[in-house]
């Protein structure tokens, strides 16, 4: 995973429960993030999708060190984020951001996946403009059919 903008290796974030008298119990915990590996290159975008409560926000907050990691490694531009001082992390956060889900723009359950991710646009191949149109009611490219995407 060398040369990546962001590298996350075996990241874990556990929330320990408290026992009697407020003492942390290391044997009783919730594994919010458990063994995540991610590599994002320069110019790439990472989208994390999952059910409510599956750890998406916790993962993002742990990468930005807004929450403490239990173990693992987070490298941003080759620099280990989890080992930086608090002041250095604040400076690094100016270069990183997490965009939270906009509930108003979330996936519409009535809209097919293909239509959601392939809006009315014209795809072009090559510089000469010899492309084909992807209209919402056209047949999707064969690759999307293999993945189970269907046109409406």
Image: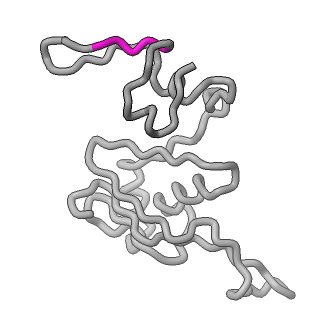
Question: Majority secondary structure of the magenta segment?
Answer: strand
**Which residue occupies 60% across, 49% down?**
50
Q: As drawn, is 123 to the left or to the right of 83?
A: left
Residue 22 to residue 102: above or below: below
Q: Is residue 141 above or below residue 94?
A: above
Return the x and y of residue 59 as percentages of the image width and height: 54, 59
Can you say whether 80 is above or below 39 in the image? below
Q: How are the residues colored?
A: one colour
Residue 104 image point, x, y percent: 66, 27
**Figure quadrant of the C terminus:** top right
Q: Nearer the viewer, residue 92 or 97?
A: 97
Nearer to us in this view, 2 or 111 = 111
Q: Nearest the camera: 133 or 21?
A: 133
What's the magenta region? 132-136
Q: Residue at x 82, y 85 (%)?
A: 19
Q: Position of residue 45 (x, y in %)?
A: 38, 42
- Number of numbered labels in the structure image: 0
Residue 135 sits inside the magenta stretch: yes
């Amino acid at each position: 995973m060398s040369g990546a903008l962001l590298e996350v290796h075996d990241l874990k974030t556990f929330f320990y429960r408290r026992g009697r008298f407020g003492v942390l119990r290391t044997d009783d915990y919730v594994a919010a993030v458990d063994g995540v590996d991610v590599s994002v290159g320069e110019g790439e975008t990472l989208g994390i999708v999952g059910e409510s409560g599956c750890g998406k926000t916790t993962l993002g907050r742990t990468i930005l060190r807004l929450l403490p990691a239990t173990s693992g490694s987070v490298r941003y531009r080759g620099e280990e984020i989890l080992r930086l001082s608090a002041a250095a992390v604040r400076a690094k956060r100016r270069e990183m951001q997490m965009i939270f889900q906009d509930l108003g723009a979330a996936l519409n359950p009535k809209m097919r996946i293909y239509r959601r991710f392939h809006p009315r646009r014209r795809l072009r191949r090559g510089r000469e403009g010899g492309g084909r149109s992807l209209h919402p009611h056209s047949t999707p490219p064969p690759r999307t059919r293999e993945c189970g995407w269907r046109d409406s």
